[in-house]
Image: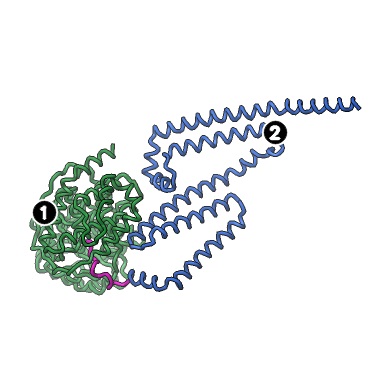
Amino acid sequence: MPQDATNDTDMPAPGPESTASDTEAAWPTDTIDIMVGLLTLNHAGSIEVVLKSVVEGLRQFFPDASALLVNCDAGSQDGTPGIITRLATGIIPVRTLSNAAGTYANLTREQGFPGRDESIHTFCLTARRVRPKICLIVEGQLRSINPSWIDHLGKPVYERGEDYVVPLFRRHRYEGTLATNLLYPLTRALFGKRLRYPSGGAYGMSGTFAGNLVARPTWTGAAAKYSVDSRLTTAALAGGYRVCHTSLGARDQDTTLGTVDLSVVIAQSVGGVFHSMEEYESSWETIKESSEVPVYGEPESAPDPGPLHTGRMVSGFKQGLRDLLPLWELILSRDTLGQILALDIQDPEEFRFPPSLWVQTVYDFALAYHNQTLHREHMLKALTPLYLGRTASFVLETQHGDSTEVERTVESLCREFESSKSYLVEQWRWRDE
Amino acid sequence: MSDLWRDTMVAGFRDTVMQIVLVLPRLLALFTFLTLGLLAAWSVKVLTLRILRTFGFDAFCERLGIVQPLSQAGVRRPVSLIVSGVLFWIVFVLFAFMGVDAMNLPATANLISQIVAFLPNVLAASLVLLVGVLCANFFAEAALIAAVNAQLEEARLVAGLVRWGLLLFTCAMVLTQLGIAKEIVIAAFSITFGGVVLALALAVGLGARHLMREILERRFSHHEHKADQLSHL
């Protein structure tokens, strides 16, 4: 049993109060085909729907496979683990693993809920012990889950030999602008795979990949401050695992845990990728081109959100230009800063932040992160106004087109990231010497 | 009369000469100590600088994040130069004290022992000052970035208040540590800090209540600005 586990509901399906001792014999090894990790934190309101979908999905699409449900709970106070155990009794073997209280590296997460990272870590530790063929991770707040998700996440691993399955949810053209303008182009340029940045919710993994993740030094120390989604993705890409997308349709989730500040989102997700650049230095420096990854199912587009007002984004950029200039002077190269200062900010409707300048800006921030020019969290948060500027420009550039136009702009930006990578590599090596 | 005048003159002259004869070696000792001090301090400075540069001390300090707050505080010299400069002055001042002690002046009779007894306080105060300045810069920078990202127009004012508030607090701690006008410093700090808090409370509660309501509504209302809010991931 993993170290973090404090409550273990014994197999095959005991009552909610029963507790087993932490012994090797209590855990099945090499006999489980599918291990489903249900990540929860006070999800009593949505967990019944999620659990029923998981059970039904396993019954429909993997009728002959042996399955184990592992509830990784981050400290629910509303009886979520009890509900899971009660509902699963007699249907599927279930275990409950609770994260040790007070071990959370960061209570504010860019997505998901507090303790989610630790729950994934606990799940991977269990996967290393149980050695299942397939691992599925599903979050307890996903109300829109249906049984076919189990098929879409599990089959690529089970039948096609994929190691890491990243979901594609139905999105409108401007959803996930940080992913489309920074995280996806950057990881694509770095690791040579056209894998969209994951937005959490659910994952499919091979047992090998999930077990090997535990060996990475990414669960403690500085790395633990950053997004777990970024860590999973870069570990898969840099480790040469087979990665793919699967289309899951709409994502509707319980958002009662509130929203997180944009600068925190940027610090954790972008910081995660920058950190991976140091961790996997030898993997990305020599990659020059990118290739497609398999996509299972048909990606869906959500209806257009209507006109977006970019006024506040442009004013955010302007304020950054006025107040954060001394910090940007330390981070950005003279050429990049000169071009940013020369941007025309008089008319917000005509504001443009060219892709080439954005690429230079992101690469300069990555170099400053590597060089520790500033305190790293401050540096990452100082990127926010520049990101707002780029996002405003992205919306203004594409507002009269359709989703194809947006995709074309993103693709063009990705190519810009790839073609300018030599600048990043050169500067990175020069600073290392 | 003339004998008395002559004796007085001779005695005066003899006493003065005696005084000069007695003081001259002490003066010579003072100048010798000062010269030796200069030489020793310069040697220590050069040697320290070479050692620190050989071991890449400046790059190490940059990695530790010491250089940036120092440059923000207006100190733009390499840290190795600052350290060697401080050592220069410590060595020179020590020699100077030896020189002053050699003068054997009544006013400076216990100077060295007093200074040595006071040194721990000075060291503690220096440490408090260093940490205070670093903290003031760090938190001012954090406040500036947070305020800019929250799009507060007065971001620099917020950062300035954080910086100067912490510096004020540091100064009070340093003066207390040094034992300089302890009661006055504590009273002045309490009055100033309490006054600032009261003024802010009045300003927010009375003077700017409409503005504060607007800011809080903007911060916590999920309905406003919906049109330009995006899901970033």
Nearest to the observer: residue A294 or residue A420: A420
Which amino acid, by three-letter code, is at mark 1? Answer: Val
Residue A22 in sight here: no
- Where is residue B66 drawn, in percent x and y? 41, 45
Find residue B179 and report its horizontal and vertical position in percent. Answer: 61, 51
Q: x, y (%) of residue A381?
A: 31, 56
Is residue A41 found left or right of B18 in the rendered image? left
Q: Is residue A345 visible?
A: yes
Give the magenta-colored segment's residue range.
B220-233
Secondary structure under the numbered disc 2 in the rendered image = loop
Q: Please check the rendered image and state whether residue B19 is part of the magenta-colored stretch, yes or no.
A: no
Pick the front one: A56 or B97: B97
On the rendered image, what quadrant is the N terminus of chain A found in? Answer: bottom left
Amino acid of disc 2: Asn
Instruction: Tell which chain the image draws in green.
Output: A
In the picture of the structure, the residue carrying the numbered disc 1 is A293
Q: Residues within 10 Å of mark 1 (few under 14, many from 20)?
A: some
Say which of marks 2 and 1 sits in front. 2
Q: Is residue A275 left or right of residue A155?
A: right
Viewed as shown, does residue A374 lie left or right of A174? right
- Mark 2 to mark 1: distance in Å? 87 Å
Circle 1 SS class: loop
Q: Is residue B77 depicted above or below A291 in this figure?
A: above
**Disc 2 target residue:** B104
Residue shown at 61% from the left, 44% from the top: B118
In terms of depth relative to the viewer, which is nearer, A255 or A344? Answer: A344
| Residue A96 x, y percent position in the rendering | 26, 65
Magenta stretch, main secondary structure class: loop
